[in-house]
Amino acid sequence: MTQTRTPGQRTGGAPHPRPAASVTLTSRGAVVALVGVCFLSLLLAAVTGWDIVADAVFVMTCGVIACYTRASGLRTLVVCPPLAFAAGSLLAQVITAPDGFSALTGILITLGSSASWLFTGTALTAVIALGRGWRPR
């Protein structure tokens, strides 16, 4: 007996293939993008004084990058949000601080005042990565 299929009708129990995202990032590209966005948002916060903007942009970027990174790069991505934020803070403070002690003080104050946002961004990245199939060893 031959099965015929009309257009638009599913046959069998196989699920539809998931459409590929138009943009996918490697783990290196995701880390570079996260450091870049952290740097730019912290630089904007240093110039304008709007610290909450840098923190909110960090959490949003963590979610977006976790969604658009290839599945093979999720392991690297899960551990990098706090490191990327620290690197962005270091770069922004070196550019805007008048001397080395002020830069070090600014980095420590930024990391301390943004700790809850760092935890939130890291947890968001881990939850999205787990939802996309990443499993820790």
Image (tube, rainbow, N blue to C red):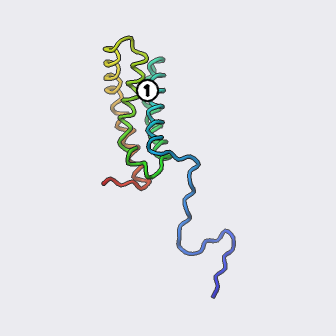
Quarter of the image for residue 121 reads top left
Quarter of the image for residue 49 reads top left
Q: Disc 1 designates what residue?
A: 52
35 is higher (above) or lower (below) than 7: above
Q: Is residue 36 left or right of residue 119?
A: right
Residue at 64% x, 71% y is: 9
Residue at 50% x, 46% y is: 68
103 is higher (above) or lower (below) than 35: above
Residue at 45% x, 52% y is: 71
18 is higher (above) or lower (below) than 34: below
Residue 96 image offset from top left, x and y in percent: 43, 16
Residue 4 image offset from top left, x and y in percent: 67, 79
Residue at 35% x, 24% y is: 110
Out of 11 and 78, give the one closest to the viewer. Answer: 78
For label 1, the crowd category at 10 Å Cα-Cα, with few meaning under 14, some 14 to 19 and many 20 or more, is some
Please give the count of numbered marks on the rendered protein: 1
Residue 21 image offset from top left, x and y in percent: 56, 51
- Disc 1, SS: helix
Label 1 is placed on what type of residue? Ile
Residue extending farthest to the bottom is: 1
Q: Is residue 95 left or right of residue 1?
A: left
Q: Is residue 76 left or right of residue 18?
A: left
Can the viewer see residue 128 in this picture? no
Out of 125 and 75, give the one closest to the viewer. Answer: 75
125 is higher (above) or lower (below) than 113: below
